[in-house]
Image (spheres, coloured by chain):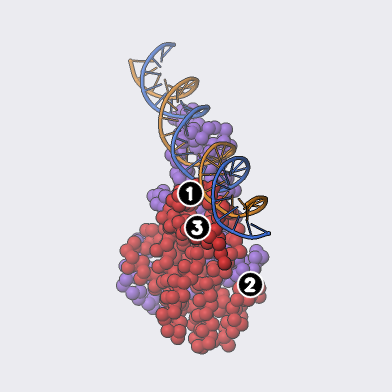
Chain colours: A purple, B red, C blue, D orange
Amino acid sequence: MLGVRARARVELTRAIVETARRHLAQDGPVNLSLRAVARELGMVSSAVYRYVPSRDDLLTLLIVDAYDALGAAAEKAEAKVPRADLDGRFVAVGRAVRTWAIEHPHEYALIYGSPVPGYAAPQDTIAPATRVPAILVGILGDAVAAGAYDPAVAPEVPPAVRRSLAPVRAAIPDVVPDDLVVRGLMAWSTLLGLVSMEQFGQFHNVLAEAASQREAFFTEALRRTSAVTTRTPAPRP
Amino acid sequence: MLGVRARARVELTRAIVETARRHLAQDGPVNLSLRAVARELGMVSSAVYRYVPSRDDLLTLLIVDAYDALGAAAEKAEAKVPRADLDGRFVAVGRAVRTWAIEHPHEYALIYGSPVPGYAAPQDTIAPATRVPAILVGILGDAVAAGAYDPAVAPEVPPAVRRSLAPVRAAIPDVVPDDLVVRGLMAWSTLLGLVSMEQFGQFHNVLAEAASQREAFFTEALRRTSAVTTRTPAPRP
DNA sequence: TCTCTTTAGAGAGCAGTGCTCTTGTCATGG
DNA sequence: CCATGACAAGAGCACTGCTCTCTAAAGAGA
């Protein structure tokens, strides 16, 4: 049984994070001020430290929230596509990521931009960070299961590259061969690269600014990426 | 003829930027303090404002410097590869970008990470920013010239996508078809995506941390990217 | 029910930031 | 030679993260 004090505590912590999220969305991670959050909540800055150890910890909470929100958006979009449509599922995930990034630019910058806190990503963030990649791993597995990707003709990956994949292999079913893991990582990099470049202004004077054209380009790029990822004809040099 | 005062002015401006660059390299863009720079130069903070309008303008100068340094590194690396070796040239550029990013993490974050100033990229930065992409455009052109990519069998790009390419088309020779432009943009996105993910810690618990293995994976990814970019057999869904 | 400990909040304060304004000093151009 | 302009310095404003001390209230044990 939680006493009045304990209930007030979780409630206030929630309110602090909630207010901080709004400030983050408006002013960006750099301008997130603990004092401003306290001010809006009608308390003095030192009182906030009873609930949040430091500004960086507050940012960490927001990072976790952002990863979760993005993961949820991607999962929801992917669930709407028939499981047999591998390309459709990948494109749906990619578009969901991009749409979420456009709607939450500062949150996106917080998780996929340059790390603003003391460089070390806390342990709490790695689990929610895997949510979107997990969807992609699912697609890879289904590509093998459905026969779109035939592991029998999968090219061998150079030993040094194989060794580099060791950590991620632990999270991917063995039926997915190393070659497909490499392709998946490349697809994920392309996806984040495209979104980040657009989000961080790297496409100015490169792509037309109109939303419809941006979307057309992005969708085309996603389709092509999916085509060279889940299909067997191997892109080997 | 420049008087004593004018000479001292350019000299001091250079010293300020130089000191700021060192601070940036050590502490990152967020922690770049105009006061600290002034302190190291033995002057008071208000004096610096005679030479630099604001902290953001100082950062802009550093952005231009960073783009130039990266561009120079990439150009140097690409120049060492025989021009007929298209894949080799692309891989060389990619590796140069990655190496430079590893050696100058904060500078890399400054130009390709989340924009830290008031979001608007000043006009001065767009020219130096095109240096590396210009190399890639050269490779695309040579792929057509050498016949590795045959424009005759190039697939048509959907009209909406074609329209989205309008701005960048102005900087790319007409012999490079739209399809190849899309491929080039995707390759550039993949390259920056890979480097940014590694740089911003997105590959923790994904790829092995050892430098040699990271490099093996990266080179493999670059080779594959080049293979699906400059060769004609089209990756069409 | 009455202490006694824990906890929440307030306020002051420290060290730091970007930036502005005033004040005195010197080099430069007429 | 002298007035004008650039320049450096200092004080000051408003802000930041964070720490400390102090008071008041809530929780737990006798």
Alpha carbons under labels 1 and 2: distance apart: 45 Å
Chain letter for mark 1, please.
B
Locate residue B148 relative to residue C22 in the image: left or right.
Answer: left
Q: Nearer the viewer, residue A199 or B235?
A: A199
Alpha carbons under labels 3 and 1: distance apart: 11 Å
Badge 2 density bin: few <14, some 14–19, many ≥20, Cα 10 Å: some
Alpha carbons under labels 3 and 2: distance apart: 39 Å
Q: Amino acid at mark 1?
A: Met
Chain letter for mark 2, please.
B
Q: Are marks 3 and 1 on the same chain?
A: yes
Pointer 1 with pointer 2, Cβ within 8 A: no
Locate residue A159 relative to residue B65 in the image: left or right.
Answer: left
Q: What residue appears at the point 50 percent right and 64 percent down from the top-left corner?
A: B65
Give residue A109's position: percent from left, percent from top.
52, 55
Q: Name the residue tied to disc 1.
A: B43
Q: Quadrant of the N terminus of chain B?
A: bottom right
Q: Which mark is residue B12?
A: 3
